[in-house]
Amino acid sequence: MGSDRTGFSGHAARSFAAALLLACPAAMAAGRPSLAITDVSIVDVEHGGLVGPRTVLIADGRIVSIDAPSDAAIPRNAERIDGHGRFLMPGLVDMHVHLFNNASHRPSNTWSFPMYVANGVTGVREMAAVADDIATVKQWRRAIDDGSLVAPRILAAGIVAWGPSPEEATHQVDVAADAGADFIKVFTELPEPAWRAVLEAAKRRSLKIMGHVPGGVSAVAAAEAGERSEEHLMQVFEACSPLEQGLLDARRGLAGRALVARRDADEPRVIAAFDAPTCDRTATALRRAGEVQVPTLVLYRVDSKPLDTAPSRDPRWKYLRPDERVRWQRFAQETSPEERDVAPKRWAVATKIVASLHRAGVPILAGTDSPMLDIYPGYALHDELASLVDSGFSPAEALRAATLAPATFLGISAEAGTVAPGKRADLVLLDADPLRDIRNAQRIAAVVLDGRPLRRAALDSLLADSARAQGP
């Protein structure tokens, strides 16, 4: 079923496995039982093929060895999962989520954790924390590590710098750095002078800038200035039209709500003015600048569908916490006729933009912005993968956007992003080949979190318990 191009077997892998076993014999003997997934096909997200059949041995949260079934040495006390006819891939990562509700002062979105895990999402990037939230993130990380919390790893958490003055923006970066933020998030409403102050302060504190491109800044200029990830294609729509410079001139001096309102008012003209050659030039410039894009296409896909003013008809509604249900119902009722009109056009242009970015070689990372209206945590990431395929990605390329590409961007590819010896055992076992059809990534037989297996029945029970906790 394909050659072993990634070095999963052979002398080097067996030597590494032996060294790891010698390094942690207590974990193998006295700790939690080791796990063996036998006779499974491994999804090689790096090269886009299958490797197998293989037996994958896991101990103390790490992949110890990957061998041909006839060569595998499985400890007597190991728990076994039959992988025959199944497919093992790295856990998925959602690179744009919101776990906190600081604007509405509601409790954090811990209700979303079972939904992520049940859908094979073993890692997330939190995009809008405040300084006080970092202690909670650290607490979650400790609980995930010791197995007392079933949740995706919070791989990175960013704190927002709002400005509006350069002095305030600089202070906000310092507060975020002192709190332990992994990066600084910026939004559309940040005025350009404050944005430049954020860039300087973040560089001084060795923090990266990620998020929206402010409404008065060029997408390419932001990338060249050092924004490392750009979300929702903000300002890329403008940069893919001949109107960009005129729009930026008209927005000069605006900030906050006035800047956002002007950007929103410009959107129909921007979408109508999409120009493919201009977009291709923009994509090439973004690639050269080294920025990654997190387009969250699922937002535009969901918005383009006929409006359902009764989201409670969705069978997943029962997993939402009651206060979240209220928020979704309010959003559904407040959607304007103008937004309903522009949404399908925005979706059509967004897929063209992402196709252009992909052709140019701009790294694309999968993210969802959950839990926005109709963006169900965990489930939405599979919709995002399908949206990437609709934009010209192969299934392998779409999977890479949710596995290896996030690990590379976050600097953790040595221990995550692929199925390989020595890496963390955050894995998803599938009943069908996702390289044939990206929808097969939803056919989950088991999820392995830090080496701990959750079979389909356990995942279903996790969701059922969560639904009961939310009430009718």
Image (cartoon, rainbow, N blue to C red):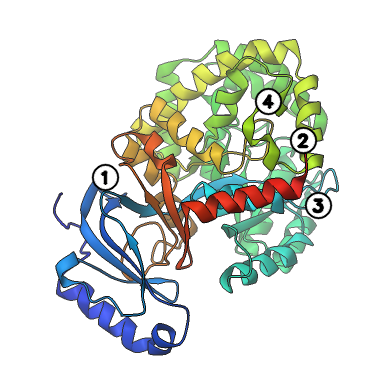
Q: Which mark is residue 325?
A: 2
454 sits left or right of 10 in the view: right
Number of other residues with Cα within 10 Å of mark 4, as a class: few under 14, some 14 to 19, many 20 or more:
few
Circle 4: residue type: Arg
434 sits left or right of 210 in the view: left
Q: Earlier in the sequence, mark 3 or mark 1?
A: 1
Is 169 situated above or below 366? Answer: below
20 sits left or right of 274 in the view: left
75 sits left or right of 157 in the view: left
Could you tell me which residue is drawn at 68 percent across and 23 percent down? Answer: 249
Could you tell me which residue is drawn at 76 percent across and 55 percent down? Answer: 130
467 or 270, which lies in front? 467
Q: Label 1: which residue?
A: 48
Q: Label 3: which residue?
A: 107
Q: Earlier in the sequence, mark 1 or mark 2?
A: 1
User: Mark 4: which secondary structure?
Assistant: helix
Residue 224: image x %, image y %?
Answer: 51, 43
Separation of residues labelled 3 and 1 (CA atoms)? 41 Å
Residue 25: image x %, image y %?
Answer: 37, 88
User: Mark 2: which secondary structure?
Assistant: helix
Label 1–label 2 contact, CB within 8 A: no
Number of other residues with Cα within 10 Å of mark 1, as a class: few under 14, some 14 to 19, many 20 or more:
some
Viewer can see residue 275: yes
Q: Which mark is residue 313?
A: 4
6 or 169, which lies in front? 6
Quarter assignment of residue 221:
top right
